[in-house]
Image (spheres, helix red, strand yellow):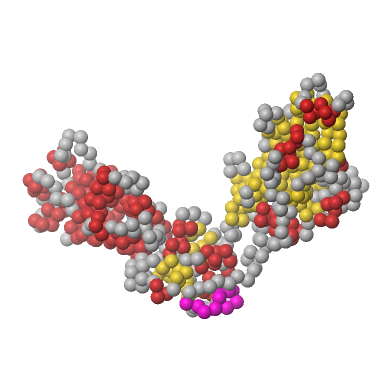
Amino acid sequence: MCNFNKNRLAYMDNWFPKIFEDVKCYSPIQGEYIYVSELTSYELDNGINSTRDYQSLLIDPELIEFIKPDEINHTTDSSVHPIYDKDYEYNGRSKVFVSDIEGLNEVKPLVISWESANNISFQLDPYFLLTYGLSPRLTENYVHWDDLRRPKMEIVTSIPKSVYDFPFYSKSFVRIHKEHIQDYIMLRKKALIQVYYETRILPKNKELDELLGEESFFERTTKYNHFRINKISENEIFTEVTGYRVLYFDNSIPISKWDRKAKEHIWPDFDESINRMNAKHLDYVYVSDEVLAKYEQDENYTVYPESGSVSYKNQWSVSRCSRIGRNHIKIELFKLYEGTPNEVISYWNKFSVKKDSIDIEGKNIVVRAKDLVYSYLRFGELLSSALNYSYNTNFTSQDIVGLNRSELNYYGWHNNASISPITHHLSHQLSKQSFLYRQKTLNLFLVENFVEKQLRSIIKLFGIELSKFKKSPNEEFRSIKLLNIILNYFRIAKETGLDIKKDCEEINSRLEQEGELKEIEIIKQLSALNSMRQLDSHKVGSDSDIKLFNALYTFGIDKSELTNNYLTSCELIYEKLKNGFTQASNIINK
């Protein structure tokens, strides 16, 4: 027996042959979507091929009782390739004949179709698309229509063409979000019915023998269906059913009132609920910066990390914001309610907090990120300047650390691809997994941005023989180790007053005499950061945990201080890295 929800669909409770039991049970409502059009040939469970042609129509509700299933023509009658006649007034048409009474003889389909050279095309009524301002998006297999204002994607999805290659039709369909269908039929003051036509060639069986008897043809009309069974050979029987079903909805209009309906919210620190009418200038509310999680990972939104503002294309924005304290955002109420969709306001409202619960004195992650970025950039600038001064070279910070101050200032320091992820908010209850992911983004910014080729050229400029610093024949020198040698070269020059160019032989001699290179603080930190990027946060065990604890110890974090919340540890690492690059700059800067 089929399983269906009778409150949502009107199903036939009259006679239905078992050969079409699946048609009786079929529901065009699947999850949040309704298949309003479908043409396809497919295989049944028993290996029999069947062809389905289902279309949806908008009709006046009072006409439903007059539908005659045996008269339904499921195919859209569309004007194709008209012939010109000066006395003929041409009107493009797209209609379905349902029954021979006024109002049902020319019913407008929800999906227009036409055929050309065995290609059947399907196009959702453009007025539906226009009503909701939907925009097309093409993928390899589908056409999607999105509501970019909200945004809500895939309101409509379709395969807009079926190709007929006897005896099969390739799959095509039009699928619409059910809330939009419900909204549309209320706006149109219509009912939505689905007319269907299903055909299949079946082998002889007991039921078919009983229906045919001694005849070669059987036909029966019920309230909702018309069945035809035709014996085409001794062992093959052609079967078809034409019918209709009514799709029922409640009387709500879920979409059209979306940005007009008066919506009120309760905000902490306010006695009355706030709506568009009473939201005032210079009244402020406060939200956790965790509200940004939804937007930081979606390229459709623009997040301004220093203020906490968010915008969606040219549709709406949450502006007049400012980061406040350690991890919160301050928003002016009037601006929030001025042109922001209700569902966006409701989303931000979920993160609201009382002002007196905010850590006002704390430093937010964006300030920490900015301090780190410019400390790192300053290091690159000083290193390139020192080389250019002594060796008359043309190094820039871009050559060494992949960053340029003028570009950062012009385009916005946080818009750099490697910097943006380290400005993202930190969960107030930061898990180990999220903590390690953030270390990967820091490593990508700091370690991967070092231009290894240029570091090697500096090594050559100083006349340093890398082989003399190898601890084993197979040891490789990558960015961090190369940088450590360079910083030690500058350290000796500064400690002894030697000139990095004129006295390069003496500096190299002293480097070699020291035997074990001193590991500069920033080098220890970068090595620890690099080791954490390789840790699997899902592993629990001695090896992984020991590596993590050792790395954290480098930053002055003892494992005894760790809890299930890694937030403070993550913030401290930003601070330590910033200080590490400041110290490295001091080694270079005379």
Which of 99/137 is in front?
99
Q: Residue at x 36, y 55 (%)?
A: 431
- Which percent across, then down, holds residue 487? 18, 52
- Which percent across, then down, holds residue 116? 76, 36
Quarter of the rendering containing residue 16? top right
Is residue 277 on the magenta stretch?
A: yes
Which of 28/161 is in front?
28
Magenta residues (range): 269-278
Which quadrant is the N terminus positioned in?
top right
Which quadrant is the C terminus positioned in?
bottom left
Is residue 161 on the magenta stretch?
A: no
Identify the main secondary structure in magenta. Answer: loop
Relative vertical location of residue 327 with respect to residue 125 in this rendering, above or below: below
Which of 343/111 is in front?
343
Q: Residue at x 22, y 54 (%)?
A: 554
| Apparent side of residue 261 relative to residue 551 in the rendered image (left or right) | right
Which of 460/548 is in front?
548
| Apparent side of residue 123 relative to residue 469 in the rendered image (left or right) | right
- Which percent across, then down, holds residue 73? 83, 41
| Apparent side of residue 220 relative to residue 323 in the rendered image (left or right) | right
| Apparent side of residue 453 relative to residue 133 in the rendered image (left or right) | left
Residue 208 visible in the current orientation = yes
- Which percent across, then down, holds residue 189? 78, 59
Residue 445 visible in the current orientation = no
Q: Residue at x 29, y 49 (%)?
A: 532
Residue extending farthest to the right is 87
Relative vertical location of residue 371 with respect to residue 503 in this rendering, above or below: below
Q: Residue at x 72, y 50 (%)?
A: 6
